[in-house]
Each structure stands twice: as structure tokens, then as C-alpha cells.
Image: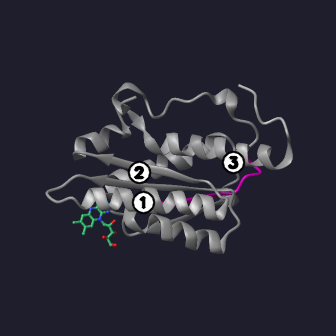
Amino acid sequence: MATSLVNLSTYDENTIKDISKYSFGIVVADWNKEITHKLFEGCYDTLLLHHADKDKIHVYQVPGSFELPSGSKLLMNKFKVDVVICLGCVIKGDTSHDDYINNAVAQGLTQLSILSGKPQIFGLVTTNNLQQAIDRSGGVHGNKGVEAAYTAIRMAQLKEDATFTKNTIGF
Ligand code: RBF
């Protein structure tokens, strides 16, 4: 489904249990920071809204989205976290840099998720222009940072369920 048909800030709060026990990493790219810092606000505020423990939220800033996987790896080396949320904004330009960066981030985070066993959340806004990015960072299409926080909560809960219980199915 196209993002234009969903609001990135909408989720089912009933699926969220006690998240104060989870430890979160957030890695934010500073490139296009007028967008990414709004993604961070949406993400951080959503975690706090659901009573995440501030002391268990670890934040790293990296220069650009390409550095998100390595930033996450460095964060995980330093802090014991359940899940890492990576936030960035890649906007198409005159060259194909966006393809290289987007693919590198997607592949890097996929590999890191599998190798580390810690879910890596793809909070990358990848757009054709600045307006589309504004629309997805607290604009008409909501905030992808909120969506990324919710996804992280779901994955932290799944990780806990998968580790400690056998009944993992239940819609
Ligand atoms: N980083 C982003 O997060 N978003 C971008 O839209 C973006 N565009 C870039 C365009 C060019 C031509 C270059 C060279 C870099 C760009 N970067 C961007 C930075 C990239 O993620 C990385 O920080 C640098 O390439 C250094 O490794």
C-alpha cells in the first residue's frame, strides 16, 4: 500500500503492554536534519508515551543515513539493547546517490538484525522531493518516527515472547 494511503502515526495501542523493561537504541542521521530531528521527536515521544524508561533509551547521532548500520553496531557494542531504531531521510537528487544509500542501509540493517539477533528498525524516509519528506515527518501523512517506535515496541515484545513462552500466535 502506498504511504499516501496510510497515516504513519496511526497504530493499535491495545497491542502495547509494559515497555518499561525494554532497552531501546535510537540512531539518527543528521543529513536532512530538519526532517530527521522531527522523526526523532515522534519516535522518542511515542516511547515515552507508552512509559519507556528514559534511562533505557540510548541515542547516537551519525552524519548521514549511510552511517546508520555502523552507528547501530557501535551503539550495540556499548549498550545492551533489545532493539535499535534507525532514523534517516534520503531525498532523490540529480544523481543516483539515493539508490546506493537506500540499498546499503536496507542491506546493512537486514544483516545486522540477523547476525546480532537484535531487530533493526528501518526508519528511513525515502522520497522524491522535500515536500514528501515533510509530509511524512509530522505532516499530512503522519510521522515515520512514530511508526518506527511502534514497530520497535512490537519487535521487542515479540523477542521477549519468542524467548520465554511457547504460545507466540494470537491475533
Ligand atoms: N545522507 C542522507 O541521509 N540523506 C541524503 O539524502 C544524502 N544525500 C547524499 C548525496 C550525496 C551526493 C552524497 C555524497 C551523500 C549524501 N548523503 C545523504 C550522505 C551519506 O549518507 C553519507 O553520510 C556520506 O556519503 C558519507 O559516507
**Is residue 25 inside the magenta stretch?**
yes
Measuring from the top left, give residue 166's x and y in whole percent.
85, 40
Contact? badges 1 and 3 (CB < 8 Å)? no
- Tell me: 113 left or right of 63: right
- Given this view, does label 2 or label 1 mark the residue nearer the observer? 1
| Residue found 81% across the figure and 50% down from its top | 163
| Residue found 18% across the figure and 55% down from its top | 93
Contact? badges 2 and 1 (CB < 8 Å)? yes
The residue under label 2 is which amino acid type? Leu
Separation (CA) of disc 1 from disc 3: 21 Å
In the image, which disc is placed on residue 124?
A: 2
**Number of marks present in the image shown:** 3
Which residue is the site of mark 1?
105
Q: Nearest the camera: 26 or 67? A: 67
The residue under label 3 is which amino acid type? Ala
Give the magenta range: 19-27
Name the secondary structure under disc 2.
strand
The residue under label 1 is which amino acid type? Val
Contact? badges 2 and 3 (CB < 8 Å)? no
